[in-house]
Image (spheres, rainbow, N blue to C red):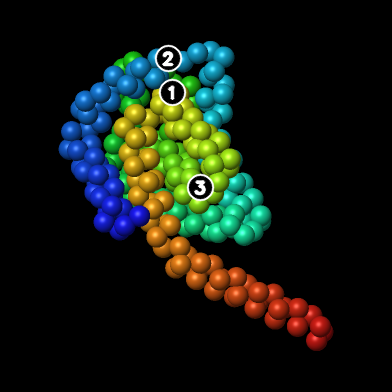
Amino acid sequence: MNWRYIFAIYAIYIAISIIVKIIGEAGVPGNIFFYHLINSSQVSYLNPVMVFLSKYGREYVWIPVTAALFIAGGKYRRASIILASAFILAIILGELSKYSVAEPRPFLVLSNYHLLVPKPHDYSYPSGHALIVGVGAITLLLTLPYYISVPLTIEALLVSYSRVYVGVHWPLDVLAGWILAAAISFTALKLENFEMKVYNKLKDFLIGISDSRAAEKKRV
């Protein structure tokens, strides 16, 4: 994708962030309505699944996936390196956004909500879970076959939905997370050559350390 379009996606995200900063998420049309629509649709037999996805669908899926792709080698290793780079950028930009916008969670604003998990103590916008799993899904859709990327994209969508379902995020948090995720994924893909150079230099450095230690053991 052309840098112009990538910057346009970043611009959309920044524009939404400015609006949220000025009027608050409760003031964004439809945000309260869709929060209640999703959060009040809880079904008892689905609740444990949604809680599990909300708690563990990010780190407990995407870290092992990235590691497994790296170990598999070839095109899978390429995808894992791009994925890891995108995750690093997502963590940095996500945290900067949270503390720049400083938007309270919906349960701190609304009087009517159904909370299924302990209350998080950080800010709400954007959803860190939606951002990370969105980066994972979009990056894999761009780099790997559908039989790998599509199931993981479904998982990412379910994790994102679960964050509103369990009561800890506004719908706009999730939408903004995916918009930023798209921009970051395209950025990571554009910077692939740089990322590969960094990876190769790091690999050569570690191999050099390993070889020098092996040589020292032989001398001893």
Q: Mark 1 and 2 residues: CB-CB less than 8 Å, in contact?
A: yes
Residue 122, image x and y in percent? 38, 38
Mark nearer the N terminus (2 vs 3) = 2
- Answer with left or right where residue 150 lies relative to residue 183: right
Which residue does the numbered mark 1 point to in the structure image? Answer: 165
Q: Residues within 10 Å of mark 1 (few under 14, many from 20)?
A: many
Please give the name of the residue rendered at 45% of the width and 63% of the height, measured from the top-left corner.
192
Mark nearer the N terminus (1 vs 3) = 3
Residue 65 visible to the viewer: yes
Residue 144, image x and y in percent? 54, 49
Q: Residue 140 carries which label?
A: 3
Q: Does 8 sit above or below residue 53? A: below
Residue 106, image quadrant: top left
Q: What residue type is labelled 3?
A: Leu
| SS for dot 3 | helix
Q: Which of marks 1 and 3 is in front?
A: 3
Q: What residue type is labelled 2?
A: Ser
Q: Mark 1 and 3 residues: CB-CB less than 8 Å, in contact?
A: no
Q: Is the C terminus in the top left, top right, bottom left or bottom right quadrant?
A: bottom right
Q: Which of 152 and 57 is in front in this view?
A: 152
Which residue does the numbered mark 2 point to in the structure image? Answer: 41
3D distance between C-alphas at marks 1 and 3: 25 Å
Q: Is the N terminus in the top left, top right, bottom left or bottom right quadrant?
A: bottom left
